[in-house]
Every structure is written in C-alpha cells, then in structure tokens.
Amino acid sequence: MYKLLTISAFILLCCIFSGKKTDMTSKNIQNELGSSEYEESTDAANELVAIPIFSKTSNINNNLSAIAADISFVQMDFDPPFNDFHISDIALSENHIFLSTLSSITSYDWNGKFIRQIGSRGQGPREYVQITSPLQIDHKNKLIYVQDLIRKVIVYRFDGTFEKSFQLKDMDGKIALIDASVLALRQTDVDRRKNPSPLIQFVDNNGSEIKTYWSNHYPIPREKQQLLASMNPLWNYNSGIYYLEFGADTIFRISGNSMIPSRVLTGNLKLNVVESNSGKVGNKLRIARRTMYPDGCIFESDRFMVFRLSDDFECFYMMYDKKEKRLHRTYHKNATEDRISGTKIMAHFYDDVASGLDFYPLCQSMGKMIGLLPAFEIFEKKKEILDFIAKNPNDSSNRLKQIVQEITEDHNSVLMLVTLK
C-alpha cells in the first residue's frame, strides 16, 4: 500500500514540478514552484515517501518512553523571574540556552545560570520593537538573528554585542536560517492572500533576494480566506531542513536554496487547502500549530515523525514509526477543554521515565523537543515526584531529584529536553 502511495505521489509531483508553466491561480505565475531544482536532484525519487498521518488509529500510547531516547532537565535561575506564558521561543547552542519573549532575549548556561540580556526594546538600529519569529542561531559564527515587527533583522553575537541589522524588502515571511550565508522567509497568512502567493523566499545574510518560489495552492478564493496559521512549520532533522506549507501535503527538504519534495502526507481524514482554512472541519484532521510556538507542531528523528493534529473535537499528537510503518496517538480520557474552541486538549505525553508529570512540547532546537515544567506544579507535587523517582531510578530521574528537593513555588520553571529515538 505504501509503495502504491509513493509511486502515485511521485507521478503527481513530477507533473507539478515539470519545466512547463502552470496556471494554478487562474493566471500565469512566473518562476512557479517546481523548477529544475527538483528535476536535477538525483536522490528525490528515492527520498519521496508517503506518510499516512491523516488517518484514524486506535493505537493509543501516551507514554514518553515510547518515543524518547533521552530526557534531561535544567533548573533556570530565579533572577530574573519570567512568566511561562510570555516565553515565545527557546533556542539552544553548544554552551547557551536562549529564551525570548515578544520584547526580550535572555541567555543562560547549561546549568540554567543567567548570563545576560541580549539587545533591548526600542526603535533604534540595534533595538527591536517586537520579536515576531523564533530565534535563529548561527552556531558556526556564534550569532543570533532576531526578526522585528517593523521588517528588520537584528544580528547579535552570543556575548550580546550588536553585529548588524538590515531591512527585509518583499515577503511578509518570517526568517529561518538555512546556513551562515542564506536565510529563508517562510510564508505567512499575509503572503497567502497575495496573488501570486510566495511559498518561500531565499535571501542572503544582508536581506538581498536570491530566489523566490511561488505557491501552487494560494491564494484561495477570497470568500474562503479564513486563514488560520500565521507561518508555515519548518524543522531540522539529521542535518537537513524540512518545510511544509499550511494546508498542503508535500514536505520539502531545503538544500541550499533548492526545494526538493521529500514526503507526501496522506490519509482518508486529510483536508484540502480550502478545508484547512475553514473554521470547522468535523472529524477531518489538520496540522495544529501553536499560536506562540510555530515550530512546535512537527518533530522528526531517525525513528519517528511526531505531528500535532486537531479536528473539531480534540487536539493530540500522532506518532508515525518509520521503522514499523505504524501510527499511534495520544489520548487522555480526562482531558481539559479549550475555552475558545471547545476541543479536548490531548497534545501532551505522560513522562513515565523521570518525573511522572505531563510533558507539553513547545518548541525544538538542536534535535530536542523542549517544554517547561512550572515550579509551582513541581512544588505542589514534590512528594509524588520523589516517590516516582524512588520507584523509577535512572539517570534522567536522578538528575531531576536534586531540582525537586530544592525547588520552591517562586522559582522559575524547569526546562525539560527530550531527544527522540
């Protein structure tokens, strides 16, 4: 069955990605997605596979041990205090942990010790009005790229000193660092309303355009434009960068400034692009991105792909086991309801390895799923957690034990880092 899906998907994509001009939006779109980069790729045909993620499954497994190879914890310094709800991104480097809110960036070492605040709020060339995309880390040159509300990118060194700033010109898109010299601007809801609609734009590290790919799916008819996702998900796996357009079914691998079709998402509960932008979808499934954490909805490792999905009734994680070619999902019988949508919130795991607590993945960096464990919750459940650790002694739980013994309800949250199998 998987071979048939793969062959069919490959034939379809070969049609889409031919050198012939397409008329996907009732007008000719120059430089449309699907130029020679796909045709010239020697590994594209072998790489393209079907992932039946939009399917119903009765295989339930909430346990983190089913997907986790390693779990670690970092107690963040109490001073300065931060509010979990204000954190918009967590990014890692070899020696640093960076936390950002809409109006600040702070750096810590891997023991959670506060180092410094990076940059400051303002309208000067070295300042940001509001941080609007996840932090982008240039590990090689020890640089942090920050995107401002006013279409400006500010670059700081890890030590907090200002490096440079530059303006973005065309797309509304949010930056993603591809390598030390290339950034990608990924499509947002504003870009999806344009005709033609840009899918992704590659720029150099001074903001000058290198290449733009155009969407074959947007814009959709104006009366259908209830666009629900602000930016497309992008994630790293095995030294590669992967990208998915909201509502579409093709995952692209980014190679330099080329887009190579890599996976096709399938399943009998899949929505089309117009349906994906509808408020109500019944029991059909779509990618459910977080408002504050756009990169917290798709995670990938050698063994698993993990998707945050939702329909009109529930929000949960679906896991695709690449080795076994099987699906399993999270399901929590006593899940709480979202106050606005009314959906049952089941998008979390039970940490049956180290803490006995629930784990809510928020974002990812350096191949790790990242979440926050509130100090007040750990303090209130101190006895239960220590009892759990006593019954489940291992390296991960032993690392957590000292944190639990010393924590108070006034401390900052504990960072929880999970490496997938």
Image: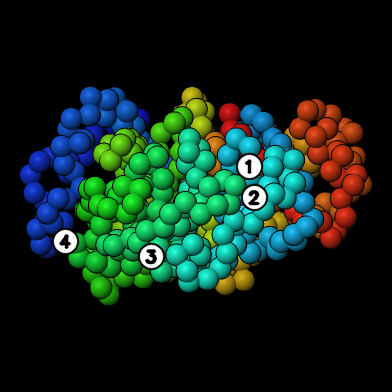
Nearer to the camera, 198 or 46: 198
Q: CA gap, disc 4 to disc 1? A: 45 Å
As shown in the figure, which amino acid type bears the numbered disc 4?
Answer: Thr
Mark 4 — residue? 25
Q: Mark 3: few, some, or many residues within 10 Å (few <14, many ≥20)?
A: some
Quadrant of the frame with the C terminus: top right
In the displayed structure, would residue 289 be above or below residue 36? Answer: below
Q: Is residue 355 left or right of residue 408?
A: left
Which residue is at a point 79% across and 41% down the rendered structure image? 355
Circle nearer the N terminus (4, 1): 4
Q: Secondary structure at mark 1?
A: loop
Q: What residue lies at 80% left-to-right and 34% top-to-bottom?
A: 399
Q: State the mark number for residue 107.
A: 2
**Marker disc for residue 96:** 1
Residue closer to the observer: 256 or 144: 144
- Kindly check if marks 3 and 2 are in contact, taking CB atoms under 8 A apart as contact: no
